[in-house]
Structure formats: structure tokens, C-alpha cells
Amino acid sequence: MGDPLKVRVSGPLAGLVPPFRQELFRLGYASNTVAHQLRLVAGLSRWLAGRGMVAADLSESVAESFMRSWRRTPVNLRTTRALKPFVGFLDSSGVQRKHDAPKTLSPADRILGDFARYLVAERALRPATVTNYLNQTGPFLRWRIERAGANFGSLGADEVTDFLLYRAESETLGSIKVAATAIRSLLRWMFMTGIIPSRLDAAVRSVAYSSYAGLPKSLTKTQVQAVARQADSSNVGTARNGVLVGVLARLGLRAGEAAALRLDDINWRSGTITVPGKAGRRVVMPLPVDVGAALAEYLSTERPAADDRHVFLRVLAPHRAMSPAGISQVITGMGARAGINGRISAHQLRHYAATADLAAGGNLTEAGQLLRHTDQATTRIYARVDLDMLRTLAMPWPGNQAGGGANDAERANS
């Protein structure tokens, strides 16, 4: 274990080391990690001194130059990510660092940047959704620019169709459906902003695919209980991981909604929780007693002390809000430790919330309210989850009716 107090730093960064060390401890870093960070700063300080530089000269390109020399040492194969805590400390301390000249954006990147700002400001889409839209529309813009240049005034519907057909050669129908939705939104925006002279979004026809064609990918009660038990076997985040299973499987939250929860969203007096949903909607829901008790235990005994007001924080320093991907990874790991075949996702726990409500005697309207669906058609998929009830509605196959119909051989020869 390294001792942070024994790390000696000389050069232009020496005076910044004591407050930086204190900040690392405040953020929850372990002593060994703090010592490692300070050794990195010591190397950086010597490197800057040898070039007559000071802390203000630490631009992105200077940091990269230092890391190229630092990588030559036998035990420190790192990227500029390793300097992120120190660079963040400099910025928060008011050190006016030099910055490299902004890189010249490609025509596609300029359009994507403006489109992203529209999606956030005008459509109030969540960051994950915006990223997904950009991932789908970026390849289309670059594909078209490679074929016909950056002037989109001549863009035609046939080109949009050609791109989607090109994608369909190597991708699933579900992926093409997502791409079509994003490109349709992009074309609508490009027309509104005058980038293209006529509306082309109507030319992007709906893809004949439905993610609701099968049964919801839910879990059984026994499987959910097995996943929940894995919280107690976790090396870290025992109480937090148990609460995550509760809010996903009992309240039907999406991983992104759980990640967005803030301490101010919990009203202990009224026993409610405000869920930040899609398109900026906020829905007040009752907080089940058992979930509330588990949440209170997590907040009082395990949640790190941090300025961040999000409910679910990373266990390892820095103690920032968990991302939706981080929550999904936690649930997937718990499912794997529970020995359940196949990958378990956070969304399957959300499905379980609806199926459990129906199994307890609830109806589709109540399931839709639990999942906060704005369209009842979205909830209709759950009408197919009670297989025993569906069997009573199914008409018997004519060939299996007593005293009538042909046998299998007769049907095969007919």
C-alpha cells in the first residue's frame, strides 16, 4: 500500500499537491489510489519543469505529450484518462489552463451537433436517446457525403431508401426500424432548418417489424428472488444493489429512470416517489413499504457521503451518480451469479413488475399506469402473458376433435 504523505513532488506543481491530496480523500479515493495519483503528478511536474512549463500550460496536447513519454516507463502504461482527476482539480481551483485550438468539424459533425441541440432543447429527449439518434443518423450523413458531397440540397428519397437497403443487408429488422425512426426525425429537422428544400421524412416508410411479436421477456418470481439474494453476496454495494432490484421489479422503473432519481424525489412523509420519465414527464408513485425500508437502510448505512444528490452512487471513488449502463451491468452480474440461463437485463425486471401485477389480479389499465405508458397499445403485449388463460380461449385444432377430422397421415396426404 502506498502512503500519500510520503510522495515527494518538486517543480511547478508542488504547491498544488496538498489541496489535491485533500480533494482526492474527500472524493472517497483509497490511500493507495491517492498515492498513485500523486506519483503521476510528481512525474508530470518534473516533465513540465524540464520544459520550462507551469500548470497553466497543461493543455490537452501537452497532457498527451507527457503521457507518451510516461508510457515508456515499464509499469505506467496509461492514457490521458489517468490525468483526469488532476486536470479536473486544476479547473475547479480556477487555474486558467491553455486549451488547444478547436478541431475543425466535418460537415457531418456540424449537422449532428445542431441536430443534437434540437433534440435536447425542442424535443426534450433524454441523453441516452439523443446518443442513439446520433449513432443512427451519423452513418447516413457520412454515407451520403462520400457519395455526393456535403450539399444536401439535391438529396432525394431514393438515396434514403438506398441507405436503408444497404443497412438491411447486414443488420436485423429491429436495427433498421430504429435507424428509420432516427433518420425520419433528422430529415424532418433538416427541412425545418432549410438544409433540404423539401420534406423527405414521409419517404421513410415504416419497417414491418414489431418488438411486441413475442411474449414479454419477463422473469418468474423465483428468478427475481434469486437475483435479489445476490445483493447479499456482493463484495460491494450490498444494500444499494438490493434497492435497485426493488425499484426495478416493484416500481417498474427503467434503468435510466433509476439512474436519474434524486434524493429530493423521495417524499418520506407522504410515502411517495417522483419518477423522472420520458420527454421530461415526472410521475408521482406510491413507495411500497418494503422498498422504502430498504431505501432508507441504504441511504443511512451505505450510500457514500457526497455532494451529488442522485440516489444511486458509484461505490468506488469518485462517488458520482450511476449511469443507466452501470445499473444494467449490476443487474446482469447479479443474474449471472444467480445461475439463471441467459443474460438478465434491468428491463426484464421492469417487465416482471407488470406481469406480477396482472398475476395478482390487476388489469391492463393498472399495468399501464404502473409502467407509466402514455399509449395503452404499448401495454397490450401483456394481454398474452397468462398462457393458462389463453389456452381456454384457443380453438381446438380441427384434426384433434373427437370423432371428426382426419388423422395426421390423412392430413399429410390430402
Image (cartoon, grey):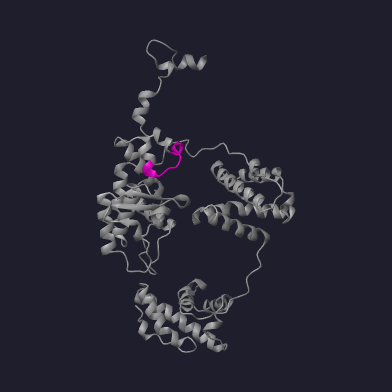
Residue 376 highlighted magenta (yes or no): yes
Q: How many marks?
A: 0
Taking the spot 33% from the left edge, 41% from the top edge, the residue there is 220
Is 107 on the left or on the right of 172, as rendered?
right
Specify whether 173 is left or right of 195.
left
Q: Nearer the viewer, residue 54 or 375?
A: 375
Quadrant holding the N terminus: bottom left
Image coordinates for residue 364, horizontal then vertical, percent: 37, 35
Name the foreground residue: 106 vs 80: 106
| Any part of residue 273 in sight | yes
Instruction: Provide residue 250's location: percent of width, then percent of height.
Output: 32, 47
Q: Evaluate whether residue 218 shows in this view.
A: no
Is the stretch drawn in magenta largely helix, strand or loop? helix
Residue at (48, 35) in percent of width and height: 213
Residue positioned most to the top: 403
Horizontal arrangement in the rendering, residue 6 relative to residue 194 (left or right): left
**Where residue 41 sits: x, y (%)?**
46, 81
Tell me where residue 312 sits by quadrant: bottom left
Question: Which x, y percent locates residue 118?
Answer: 58, 55
**Where are the magenta residues, as a range?**
369-378
Does the magenta portion include 3? Answer: no
Q: Quadrant of residue 240?
A: bottom left
Say above or below: 5 vs 211: below
Q: In the rendered view, would you say 131 is above or below 3?
A: above
Specify the farthest residue to the front: 270
Q: Is residue 144 above or below residue 411?
A: below
